Image (spheres, coloured by chain):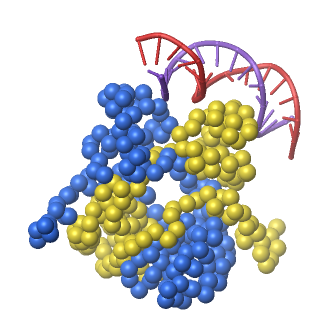
Chain colours: A yellow, B blue, C red, D purple
Amino acid sequence: MELDTLDVALLRLLTEHPRVGVLELSRLAGVARATVTARMERLRASGVVTGYGPQLDLAAAGYPVQAFVTLEIAQGRLDEVTEHLAALPGVLEAYATTGTGDVLCRLAARSNDDLQQILLELNRSTGIRRSTSVVVLSTVVAHRTLPLLTHGRQRGAHHAPSYKNPG
Amino acid sequence: MELDTLDVALLRLLTEHPRVGVLELSRLAGVARATVTARMERLRASGVVTGYGPQLDLAAAGYPVQAFVTLEIAQGRLDEVTEHLAALPGVLEAYATTGTGDVLCRLAARSNDDLQQILLELNRSTGIRRSTSVVVLSTVVAHRTLPLLTHGRQRGAHHAPSYKNPG
DNA sequence: GGTGAAAGGTCATTAAG
DNA sequence: CTTAATGACCTTTCACC
């Protein structure tokens, strides 16, 4: 779905003033309340907004150590590894990628010792050929999406850059 | 801060029923309203909950391509690169890490062409010696934190595993 | 626990593509 | 003509004191 200015404005307002109601949101955005309701429903229905769950600072919650682990998977055993990863609470997210590694996953742990335990558990999967891990030292750019939606409108990259559209 | 069962239960309820009020939350959790209010304030004040902003599916919003890029930074030029990364909307997050790379960052783009543009812009920083990128093919484990808080209670990893705490 | 104030739902009207 | 926004109605529900 393509987001217009109002959509992005609403998302920004929701980000800055997290738990405001629809009425105040409509005031802040300068549109009618029903409009806000309709837009939010549209964003939800289209799958752009997947939820409004609380955003957690894992470090503050007692998990100050994070790491990225690149896994090489034995041929045809991704499903098995997927199950294994999903069963480990320390695995925050995992993605299949191109490159020499096959899966990149992100871990959180209470300490370096705890991280080592998680890595050991992780490597107990026989579907994992090899793993390389790097520990997060500091945050350079904190997680964000609004700049992309606001300024990332450099279209044309997929609008026929050097050849005309077929047809 | 250490989270107890009620804290985790509230966070789970907030995740599943995003925009419910405190009253219904107290009913769902089976505790008094004031308790919920106090806990939520405590979670906010302690920094565990940083916000309730909307969670976005970038693919649904028109950015289906994601990539992880490992950067090697020229000695002492991390600040310069940090500024550069922060100025690029396509950079979703970035972390300084151990390992042969110095910074791991995550990008989103409208297409592979768009991704290439972003990578070119990224590499225009003279503080970046070398960059290696992998493209995300699929999600193996979707982003989550609740399993960690719920089951990730294997404490003791930082409770003097093989040596006593320094006195 | 009481009270002022929103949320949520619906709808006819109107503006714009 | 289709789609979307609007302002107004109402009832229920919540947040605050």
Pick the front one: A22 or B165: B165
Q: Residue at x 33, y 32 (%)?
A: B35
**Location of residue B144 by image quarter:** bottom left
Please count the marks in the image.
0
Q: Residue at x 69, y 36 (%)?
A: A27
Quadrant housing the C terminus of chain A: bottom right
Q: Is residue B116 left or right of residue B54?
A: right
Q: Is residue B23 left or right of residue A123?
A: right
**Is residue B119 something that shows in the picture?**
no
Up the image or down, B11 lies above or below B148; here it is above
Up the image or down, B162 lies above or below A6; here it is below
Q: Residue at x 53, y 48 (%)?
A: B53
Up the image or down, A133 lies above or below A139; here it is below
Q: x, y (%) of residue A53?
A: 46, 46
**Location of residue A122 by image quarter:** bottom left
Q: Residue at x 80, y 77 (%)?
A: A163
Pick the front one: B130 or B65: B130
**Is residue B49 something that shows in the picture?**
yes
Pick the front one: B103 or A118: B103
Q: Is residue A64 left or right of residue B130?
A: left
Q: x, y (%) of residue A65?
A: 33, 66
Q: x, y (%) of residue A2?
A: 70, 54
Q: Is residue B38 left or right of residue B70?
A: left
